[in-house]
Amino acid sequence: MRKILIITLLGLVSMAARADHIIGGEMYYTFLRKNGANNVYSITLKLFLRCDATSAQIDQAVNITVYDGSGRFYMDLKDNGLADIQNYAVNEVDPCIINPPSVCYKIGYYNTGAVELPPNASGYVATFERCCRRIGLANIYSDNNNIGGTYSCDIPGNHNGFDTNSSPSFSKEKGVIVCADNRFTYDYAAEDPNGDSLVYSFSTAYTGADRDDPKPDRSNTPGETVTYKPPFSADQPLGDKATIDPKTGIISGIAPKSGLYIVTVTVKEYRNSILIGEHRKEFQFTVTSCVRQVVAAMPDKYSDCDGYTITFINNSTPNKEYVWDFGDGNTLTTTSRDPFQHTYATQNTYNVKLSVDKNSSCGDSAFAKVLVYPVLKPSFDANGLCITKPTQFINTSTNDVGNFEYYKWDFGDGTILNDTANARTTNWQYTRPGDYIVSLYTRTDRGCEKTFKDTLSIYDKPPFSTTSDTLLCINDGLVLRAESPMAGSYRWGPLPLYNITGETTPNPFVTPKVDYTYNVTFTDLTGCTNTKQVKIDVRDKLLVRTGADSVICTGDPVNLHAVADGAYQFTWTNLATRAIEGRTPDITVTPARSSSYEIRVDLGTCFAADSINFRGVDPPAAFAGLDTTICYGEKLWLEASGGAYYLWTPPATLTSPRLPVTLAWPKNTTTYVVTVTDTLGCPKPVQASRTVTVIPPVPAFAGNDTIVTKGQLFRLHGSGGYSYTWSPAEGLSNPNVFDPVTNINRDIIYHLVVRTIEGCVGEDDIKIRYMTGPEIYVPTAFTPNGDGMNDVFRPLPVGITKLEFFRVYNRWGEEVYSTNEYLKGWDGTRRGQRIDSGTYVWIVRGVNEAGITMERRGTVVLIR
């Protein structure tokens, strides 16, 4: 759905009660009767209040002050009571608005009763002041103290016999919702009890009381007006797209953006073409967003008269059916919102209708006026762009059909409010240089209208350019140049003329023999002038220098730098090959082993030169040796060559990092880098590297120490390398395999030597203890005191292939330790805390070599 703006008259419901509860007002009078020579009136005040105004905020009585027509105080009308309070709300809501807001407000009526006033020529003014008008208004400036309002009525004098008149009053109070994507209307009409003629207009609102004295005993006559925020004004309180019909009082147009707006309407009362008086009413409008099911929208006028083919724009709700009636008997039904063109056959003014969702109860229509009168082409020329004289604007607009009836120039001079004109051809004098956007609006008697804009560069001096300050060889001459986008004349000087020909042309020829400054004055066609200078530095000789001869490393790039005493033409030449290497003061070259270069500078026929020589020396031929591999813990010698000085890194595992030969003992794979320098003239350090790959320690493993049942064969399981050697060989089936079988029947320690494929060696032992079994042996006491002896309480399984569990309990039956890992035991702690000495119960269960489950129980004494 497409969002659109709506106007809701006055306040919205569901807003918190606040001190800014006044949202408008009106005061009118009614003639009651004569009482002798005096006139008797009743005066009625209507206060418009927010819907959420509390009873404490609603005045139960008001004070009205009466002044005579000359502004002198006449009388106070005290404590005029609240006669009635009425509530207004929107009762008929457009069902095609999806989210209609609630619109409501209150009106409090206060009546003075009979007020007797003697006739006079100037009449009377009744007035009422109140603070706390609604804050946050979008079209006026307001401070945080809730700017107040003043409401009044003018009672006419008796000079025309109108002192028995009753004023008109605005009586069409109602809440409305108007969607602003289309034109809206609101009936603001008043009624006159005498049948007088009424003329309506927007007018200013007045300030009133403040919060320090919100309801004064005596009110002043209306004086200070509110200040409107641009682009709003008293004449355009809802913006330039909303107007009021002076005959009917109907406000119509397009609503402004969301916000609160104060709107005051004045109605002038006439009888027999004689003005009786004026009457005002102030309202506050709330503009908010709503969503309508279907909205038809397009530009309401196509009036540029640019040809018979018109490009139509559809801004309506998407995904609907669109029916176009072009007003020439042709129609188009489409579901596309893309711009499209329609060509008319004849010149005319056509009324176009766009219907959206035509067969729906919430369909909508938009209308546009299309002027087909080709071709209107506004344009203009401007003469004189200097601030010393007025600029002449020449209207060159053309129109093929009809006549021009209106022109409006806007000269874009932001410092002046009335920088406009309505003549066909006009003048305007700018007072400051700068760029100005000038607009020419044209309208024809057929209704065609179009604006042409152009940017003018206004100057205080005519723009022109000339030759920059320059150098000149004493033997040469020079053509000076001056140029301007403006037409005009040139004059070179100064007088008396010195070595110059063509001094009245833009391009004279000069041959000065000393430093000299020429000037040129440009004069445009309006007589506006500008003068510039050209300084010529005459040289009889040139100076240029480059660096000293030097020794360089063969193959290295070298920066060549030249210093001259002027901005000359530079040329670098390789003297060996005569090749031009560059044409700037600084270049980079890569010389051969021995090379020479010349720098030459030229200024016309003058020149100078200098040269530089290089001798190349080869850099050191650094060598660090070949990459190699060693076993963990081995040492090796590193040896470098190729220079005079050496520095090895990293130095942490080297004995002599500043010598060409050093002993290294890397712990892991390391790349050693040696930096080699020489004393032969090439100071460039050269690096070489050697990577030493260190084989990690061999993870030789002979197996965990174990207990074996006497008389049983036992298979060893070595790991960690490529080849294996067991010793002693006694009892082994093969001492050179990783898993030999031993048939020895006594306690023994086997030693295993493991070698990797690179030849690195690792060693490990296994202790085999033979005991009678299968059985589970458990000690009766242990001393966990950290002395390395008998610190852990563990079972010794003999011939047990699987340990199902080993558990220890305290005397209360609480488990203090549990494991199923082979040869693991209890260290006398529980959850990391040492426990007391004493007797503890244990239970162990395992499966022997025959697959039989064995379980043993007992006690152990923990000794601290």
Image: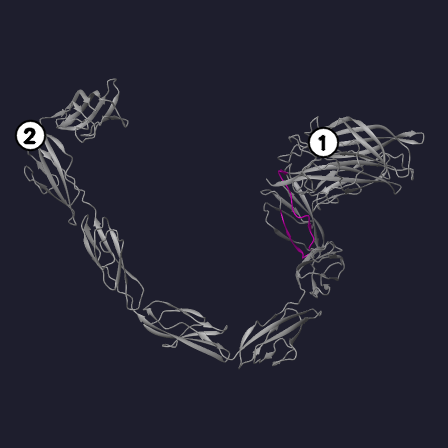
Q: In which quarter of the image is residue 297?
A: top right
Residue 560, above or below 211: below
Start-end of magenta stretch: 289-314
* Type of amino acid under label 1: Leu
Measured from the top left, where is residue 431 in percent x and y? 71, 61
CA separation in Å, label 2 and label 1: 114 Å
Determine which of the numbered discs, if any, sits on residue 49 in the image. 1
One can see residue 274 in this view = yes
As drawn, is 816 to the left or to the right of 176? left
Residue drawn 24% across and 25% down? 817
Q: Does the magenta stretch include residue 830?
A: no
Q: What colour-coding does the image apply?
A: one colour
Measured from the top left, where is residue 575 in percent x and y? 38, 77
Marked residue nearer the N-terminal end (2 or 1): 1
| Label 2 crowd (10 A; few <14 / some 14-19 / many >=20) | some
What is the secondary structure assignment of the residue under circle 1? Answer: strand
State if disc 1 and disc 2 touch (CB < 8 Å): no
Residue drawn 67% across and 57% down? 306
Measured from the top left, where is residue 722 in percent x and y? 15, 45
Examine the residues drawn in magenta and state their main secondary structure. loop
Q: Is residue 296 magenta?
A: yes
Measured from the top left, where is residue 139 in percent x and y? 69, 42
Residue indicated by mark 2? 711
* Type of amino acid under label 2: Gly
Residue drawn 73% across and 32% down? 214
Residue 187, above or below 535: above
